[in-house]
Amino acid sequence: MSKPIFSGDVVISGGGLAGLTLALALHKAGLAVAVVDAMELSEYVTPDFDGRASALAYTSYRMLNAVGAGQHLKEHVQPIEDILVVDGRPYDGLKRGGPGPDQLHFDRREISPEDDGEALGYMAENRWTRVALAKAADEAGLTVFAPARASHMQTNTTPGKNRLVLESGEVLEAPLVVGCDGKFSGLRAQTGVRTLDHAYNQKAVVLTVEHEHSHEGVAYECFMPTGPFAILPLPNNRSSLVWCERPKAADALKDMDDEGFQEALEARFGDFLGWVKPVSPRWTYPLTLKFSERFTDDRLALVGDAARGIHPIAGQGFNLGVRDAAVLADVLVDAKRAGLDLGAPATLQRYERWRKTDSVAVGLGAHLFTWLFSNDHSTIRAARGLGLSIVDQIPAARRFFMRTAGGEVGDLPALLRGDSLHL
């Protein structure tokens, strides 16, 4: 039996956004934690890594500040001051030109009226979030094994511990292994945890654009019959586009020559921000729902996309992973403080109970919204337009949706309140 290269409290497989956020939270709280990732952290900083940007809920941003990453990210985030949800159907999907007759406006001043109050969210390119987390990990002295690819997990090899075996043959052991290894988690598959899967017959074309006029911190969610078209504000008169289309149309947009794509972009984007031009490559991502039947197994916890992957319609994917990390950190610090087994069923059941309701609600909500808005049925179109208009006229409803999207619902763990954790 190989001697472990690490033996501590928690081993995390996957050093992406959720994995590093959890690792920093646990490390700063005083637990012995190690992260394994297939790529050097420095490789995440390249401008063309994956093109995606994430809308960080204000509670997620609190947590990034609490674990030490926020100070490295603040220069690269764009506060979201307003969100405008419109049904793009009145313009036939050809040109935005301005909001349609049915719209829903969220204004952060309704829940945070101070001039310097919390925004509804904070847009950041994923590469900069990775850079911030990597810098925080280096400053904190976090134990990271990278590049190192996890092969499989061994149970019952050492009493009270699981072993994560690397492809190199080296092993790490701890009472708890955490799978942060993405939507197609190898650890989840190995343990036989089943998933609910659904393909949306949509692909997202993702790119960054520059435009003439300032977006003023406004995020636009335009619903078209083929899927949502999101214009998400980034610093310096730039926006991240998430352009959902049927797969063949999305592939055509990705492979289109620059002149043809510019024409298609202007037709869909409109001129309400002046001229617009791409300033990044184009990427496409198939959109699916993948929901794990349970978030735990024998001394294993699933976090982030390993627990569930949802449609990006509400921009909640990364935020769900951050909330997983905040809750699991809270549960594990409590268990460590009480001298309990970090991988015991009772410990992991507390994590799963705490996270399951929120995950199901957000996942089903995204699924329902995708079905409701990604079609051109006249009756459904009329009903959803009426719904947008009604909610827009009810301040309490608007505040409820803003707080829900911000993650400020239910029993908040310490890190989502912006507090630090300590043993």
Image (cartoon, grey):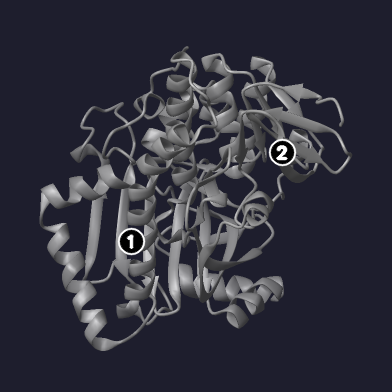
Residue 122, picture quadrant: top left
Please tell me which residue lies in front, 219 or 340. Answer: 340
Q: Which residue is mark 2?
A: 45
Q: Element under label 2?
A: helix
| Residue 253 pos. (x, y %) | 63, 75
The residue that appears at 43% across and 28% down in the rendered structure is 331
Amino acid bearing label 2 = Val
Q: Residue 226 has which mark?
A: none
| Residue 160 pos. (x, y %) | 63, 28
Q: Is residue 401 left or right of residue 257?
A: left
Q: Is residue 23 left or right of residue 368?
A: right
The residue that appears at 45% across and 52% down in the rendered structure is 232
| Residue 353 pos. (x, y %) | 36, 43
Mark 2 or 1: in front is: 1
The N terminus lies in quadrant: top right
Q: Is residue 285 above or below residue 181?
A: below
The residue that appears at 80% across and 43% down in the rendered structure is 149
Mark 2 to mark 1: distance in Å? 33 Å
Q: Is residue 231 above or below residue 422?
A: below
Q: Is residue 406 above or below residue 285?
A: above
Q: Which residue is mark 1?
A: 365
Please tell me which residue lies in front, 107 or 278. Answer: 107
Please tell me which residue lies in front, 385 or 163. Answer: 163
Quick one: label 2, few (<14), some, or many (20+) residues within 10 Å? some
Amino acid bearing label 1 = Gly
Would residue 165 be seen by someone viewing this image from the given angle? yes
Quick one: label 1, few (<14), some, or many (20+) residues within 10 Å? some
